[in-house]
Image (cartoon, rainbow, N blue to C red):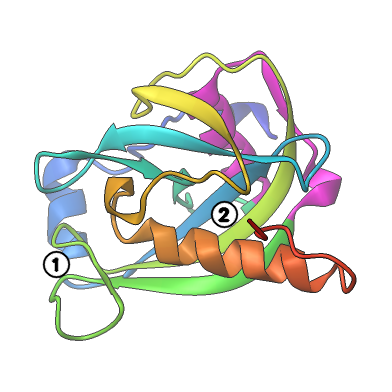
Amino acid sequence: MSQDIAGLGDRWIPEKEYQAITKRVPILCVDVLPLSPTPDSAIGLILRDTYDGGRGWCLVGGAVLHNEPLPDAITRHVLTTLGGGVSLRVSTLELVTVVEYFTKPDIGEFYDPRKHAVSLSYVGQLEGSVVPKGEAIDFQWFPIRKLPEPESFGFGQERVVERLLHHLDSRQPDSSLRKH
């Protein structure tokens, strides 16, 4: 990741200008579902505040900066959310699905009243010691067969996690990661 991008954080535009832009233009985001070094054993989720004043389990991610390569954006969000003691194995990143969050609940499957966002959702292996920071209140590894209840997710991301797990499961024709 380039040095100049690493220090920018998530706000590359002054807040007032950012608010004006998000009222007119969709924001490109990246999300990653961290996989334990043995991918069919556990996934990592952060607990964070949601737009409705609640908290929910979510993927790690956020906006892509201008001229920022997608792997750099994912790495930046992982480091700013999970701490410098982690390492995302960029060679394992795999784009799985595209998710749109609309500001009106009746347009699409996903809703976020703050902004229209288009998220490229990845899976990738994570190693190291996690120290939740930034938007992450907590981080936990969940065995794939023992995920949080759907209502404990934020932003409808239980459906995104399901898609990502379905993709991982489809790569293993003789097994099902989510069999009980």
How far apart are the two marked residues, 2 and 1, measured between alpha carbons?
22 Å
Residue beneath the point at 20% across and 86% down: 107
The answer to which of marks 2 and 1 sits earlier in the sequence is 1
Report the predominant secondary structure element of the magenta stretch.
Answer: helix
Q: Residue furthest right?
A: 174
Of 5 and 138, the residue lying toward us: 138
Of 11 and 172, the residue lying toward us: 172
Quadrant of the snapshot with the C terminus? bottom right
Q: Position of residue 56 (x, y in %)?
A: 29, 41
Q: Is residue 145 left or right of residue 160?
A: right
Which label is found at residue 104?
none
Q: Position of residue 99 (x, y in %)?
A: 44, 72
Residue beneath the point at 74% across and 66% down: 169
Q: Position of residue 140 (x, y in %)?
A: 51, 28
Give the amino acid at mark 1.
Lys
Whether residue 7 appears in this view of the structure is no
Of 78 and 168, the residue lying toward us: 168
Residue beneath the point at 31% across and 79% down: 109
* Residue 124 belongs to magenta span: no
Q: Position of residue 68 (x, y in %)?
A: 59, 50
Q: Residue furthest front?
A: 180
Q: Is label 2 in a helix, a strand or a loop?
A: loop
Q: Is label 1 in a helix, a strand or a loop?
A: loop
Q: Is residue 123 above or below residue 105?
A: above
Q: Which residue is mark 1?
A: 23
Residue beneath the point at 27% across and 83% down: 108
Give the amino acid at mark 2.
Asn
Q: Which residue is mark 2?
A: 67
Of 149 and 85, the residue lying toward us: 149
Numbered range of the magenta stretch = 71-93
* Residue 75 belongs to magenta span: yes
